[in-house]
């Protein structure tokens, strides 16, 4: 059984999704007065970028092909440890990034971890 959309149906779907996107985003972007946001939601929105980053980075560090890393000889684990230790010593963005890469590259390229 083949289900294919006609060009008109596809155009209608795209237009509908565009309208929904504009309305839902415009609800917050174009009000006449400031929309009150509860304090608990404001606190949650402050940590949302960190939570999203952790949700992307942590599985990349601890998983290989969908399974947990079973050995400590993984360059990603050493790089994460180096970056974390550097961050605890001196907070910032560039320092931990460089520390992680300085740990990762030799382990991966030289020792083949």
Image: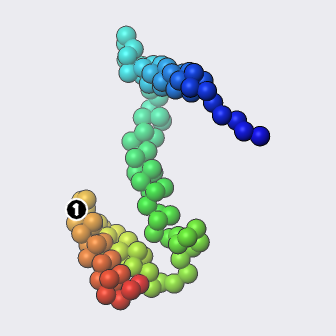
The residue sitting at 38% across, 71% down in the picture is 80
Task: Determine which quarter of the picture holds residue 28.
Answer: top left
Residue in front for this viewpoint, 19 or 2? 2
Q: Is residue 86 visible?
A: no
Q: Residue at x 40, y 51 (%)?
A: 50
* Residue 41 image position (x, y, % from top left): 47, 34
Side (left or right) of 38 relative to 104: right
Q: Residue at the location (46% across, 41% down)?
A: 44
Work out whether 113 lies above or below 81.
below
Q: What's the residue at 30%, 72% (across, down)?
A: 100
Residue most toward the top?
Answer: 32
Within-10-Å neighbours for mark 1: few <14, some 14–19, many 20+: few
Q: Is residue 92 toward the left or the right of residue 8 in the image?
A: left
Residue 69 placement, left or right of 25: right
In the visual, does 8 lie left or right of 3? left
Where does the C terminus fall, quadrant-wise? bottom left
């Amino acid at each position: 059984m083949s289900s294919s959309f006609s060009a008109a149906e596809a155009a209608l779907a795209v237009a509908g999704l565009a309208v929904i996107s504009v309305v839902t985003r415009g609800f917050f972007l174009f009000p006449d007065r400031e929309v009150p946001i509860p304090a608990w939601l404001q606190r949650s929105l402050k940590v949302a970028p960190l939570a999203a980053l952790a949700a992307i980075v942590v599985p990349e560090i601890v998983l290989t092909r969908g399974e947990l890393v079973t050995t400590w000889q993984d360059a990603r684990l050493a790089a994460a440890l180096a970056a974390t230790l550097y961050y605890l010593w001196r907070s910032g963005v560039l320092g931990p990034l460089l520390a992680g890469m300085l740990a990762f590259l030799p382990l991966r390229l030289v020792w083949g971890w």
